[in-house]
Amino acid sequence: MKKVLTLTALSTLLLSSTAMAAGFHLREQSSAAQGNAFAGVSAAAENNSYAYYNVAGLTRIKGTQFSGGGTYIAPKATAKNVRDEDGTRGADVQNVVHAAISPYFTISHQVNDKLTLAFAGNSQYGMITKYDHEWLGSDHGVTSDFKSAVFTPMAAYKLTDKLSVGAGLQVQYVWAHLTSTAGNRQYSINANGDALDVGYQLGAMYEFTPATRAGVGYRSKIRHKIKGDMESSAPLPMLNQDIQVNLNTPAMLSFGIYHDITDRWAVMAEYQRVFWSSFQNLTFVGRDGYNRPTGYISRVDEKWRDTNFFALGTSFMLDEQWKLRLGWAYDQSAVRVAHRTPRIPDSDRIWYSVGLGYKYNEHLNVDTAFTYMSAHDAHLDTSWTGNEGHNVSADYKNSIKIFTLGLTYNF
């Protein structure tokens, strides 16, 4: 039963960490911005999709504009040298993290010379991970399926010719399905849950000259109370009941700068701080009252740390229609080595991005980009974490390829 309780399970919510940005945030919300590895996204405001990073940039978008697209994220994660606490060698696990598509859209309307309104929808978090049922760490997790959607009404206002501010309301929905095993793999456990909660977004942009601008964007922490049910083949009331787990999606603070060197060549840079330290543990509570004497079914200590993201980029107009974008970024892991788990084998990564923008006519622009992420090798040993379940160790090799396609239409 001790293993069962490692249904540490809802920590699945964080598995997208292996594939996308550090933690479980999907940074991919703009096809144009991805070409620069998201350098300068808080200041560039090239189209209204950049409002995800800094809502104040909407004041640069004239008339009525729609942007939308999708990102195909193809991670490759392999667990090798898998061993249990007795030193028994297990089979390698291929394709731990599965591919996924992250969609986005934004529609904005310039009310007058000062005010712009917008509405956006995207998926901020999400991934599918699956281990073999027979793998040695199955009591720590087998399948993890997490999805999210956020809808954000926004407004931006031009206070002066140089200074703009903006704000938005984040309405965020999250859903998770998790499986694991227990009792020497003779019992299965399934957990499902969802939540709908609200946060906010703030931003400011200052244009020093027509060629140079800087921006700051902030997205608040959102406190989720995920409610659902747990079902197990084990005849234990504690493992067959309604459950609740609290999960905070982190606050994020970004600073960006954008500069046109010439009318064809631009450079940009970005720094982002993600406040993952708000995520210290996952505690599962039985809503039907079946808990341990501690007052909960299980508790998983995560002890995440705040992370840094640095990006540099450049764009060059090849001619009147084609724009080439390049970018590089360093993305720090939120997971400390001593608290890495099979569900969250996170590690630092380096981004390499290239993108092309094509101006079809005065109304339609098409953007595409490709990113290769090289993740540092990650060693896992659950004996370091102090969490429940049979100890397992493994070495992870991770890499990610990301393809995106988007369009912008000016009405």
Image (tube, grey):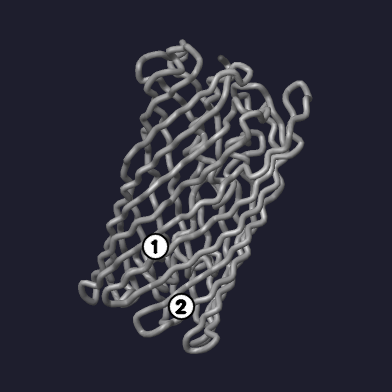
**Quadrant in the picture for the N terminus:** top right
Give the residue displayed 31% in from the left and 48% down from the top.
Answer: 171
**Compared to 207, does 202 lie above or below?**
above
Is residue 119 depicted above or below 318 in this figure? above
- Which sits in the foreground, 188 or 194? 188
> How many residues crowd mark 1 within 10 Å: few (<14), some (14–19), many (20+)?
many
How much space separates mark 1 and mark 2, taking CA atoms? 16 Å
- Report helix, strand or loop for mark 1: loop
Disc 2 secondary structure class: strand
Are the residues flagged by discs 1 and 2 in contact, CB closer than 8 Å? no
Viewer-side label of 1, 2:
1
Q: Confirm whether residue 2 shows in the render.
A: yes
Q: Position of residue 212 (x, y in %)?
A: 46, 77
Does residue 18 appear to the left or right of 149 in the view shown? right
Q: Determine which of the numbered discs, if any, sits on residue 212 in the image.
A: 2
Using the image, determine if residue 226 lies above or below residue 290.
below
Left or right of 352? Residue 5 is: left
Look at the image and tell me in which quarter the C terminus lies. bottom left
Task: Please identify the quarter of the rendering in which residue 91 is found.
Answer: top right
Residue 365: percent from the left, percent from the top? 41, 77
Q: Relative to residue 142, is residue 13 drawn left or right?
A: left
The quarter of the displayed image where residue 318 is located? bottom right
* Front residue (pair 314, 409): 409
Q: Residue at x 65, y 53 (%)?
A: 399
Q: Which residue is mark 1?
A: 54
Residue in the picture at 52% in, 84% down: 317
Q: Amino acid at mark 1?
A: Asn
Please state which amino acid type lies under the numbered disc 2. Answer: Thr
> Where residue 190 sits: x, y (%)?
47, 27
